[in-house]
Amino acid sequence: MSGQVKVREKRGKPSHRDDLRAELLAAAYVFVEREGHESLSMRRLADEIGVSSGAPYHHFPDRRSLLLAVALEGYRRMFEWDESYSQDITLPRGRIEHSCQSFLRFAMENGHIFTLMYESELVRPHLAQEIRDAQDAGFQRLHADYLHAAPGLTDRERAIRIATMWCAVFGFALQTNRQMIRSPLPEPNPDELAQEVVMRALRLLDD
């Protein structure tokens, strides 16, 4: 009974909570991690934290804006995760290897979030500008490291090699997330296979 009273109190006073937007975003992120973005609605989110069904609309105009905020939080965490472990790596090649491995690790450990970031309605039929900006930030960092790792390449050749490497790494992440990776038995374990994909993609620095 006391729990029900507390819920009613929360639902009656959504504006009195210290930072309801942050609370909504955190709850939405956890929900997507757990169940995926497809079943997330504004009403379900309100129920998750015990506020009125209209409370989320004061901070997110619609479901798409909520999903966009969750996806951008995913990019923030992914880049923060990468940066926290790569700041002591000084060689550009090492930074590229770490960034690729970090990306694959994030994709494998955060499958539902990864799907929202790269395969949801936020990227189809047109890529949301906020998502484009987040992805461009990651690309610019990769490009800068590649420029230092292979300074003798022409701009055209560098662009081709970066695109080829990204296709290999992103394609592997996508297919792993969909559980579509197949190879003859005995198969390498996922971590070993991820490592090999990155190392072979890095050979593009040596040609």
Image (cartoon, rainbow, N blue to C red):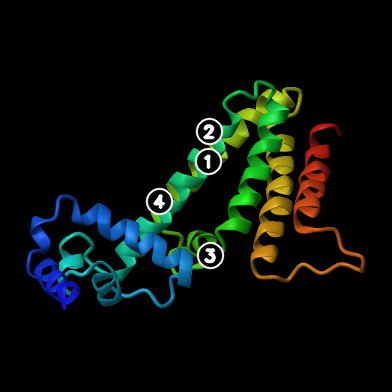
Q: Which residue is mark 1?
A: 81
Q: Quadrant of the C terminus?
A: top right
Which mark sits nearer the N-terminus, 3 or 4? Answer: 4
Q: Which residue is nearer to you in this view: 195 or 16?
A: 16
Inter-mark Cα distance, 1 to 4? 12 Å
Describe the element under mark 1 as helix, strand or loop.
Answer: helix
For marks 1 and 3, give the one nearer the viewer: 1
Q: Residues within 10 Å of mark 1 (few under 14, many from 20)?
A: some
Furthest-right residue in this view: 185
Contact, CB < 8 Å: mark 1 with mark 4? no
Residue at 73% over, 46% down: 165
Q: Earlier in the sequence, mark 1 or mark 3?
A: 1
Mark 3 and mark 2 lie on one chain; the one further toward the N terminus is 2
Q: CA distance from mark 2 to mark 4?
A: 16 Å
Numbered circle sitting on residue 84: 2
The tag earlier along the polypeptide, 2 or 4, is 4
Q: Residue 174, how many percent across, how many down?
A: 65, 62
Instruction: Determine which residue is flagged by label 3.
Output: 115
How many dots with numbers?
4
Q: Amino acid at mark 1?
A: Trp
Q: Can you see residue 124?
A: no
* Residue type marked 3: Thr
Q: Position of residue 57 (x, y in %)?
A: 18, 67
Measure the C-alpha gap from mark 3 to mark 4: 13 Å
* Residue displayed at 15% across by 50% down: 18
Q: Residue at x 16, y 78 (%)?
A: 1
Identify the disc placed on residue 73: 4
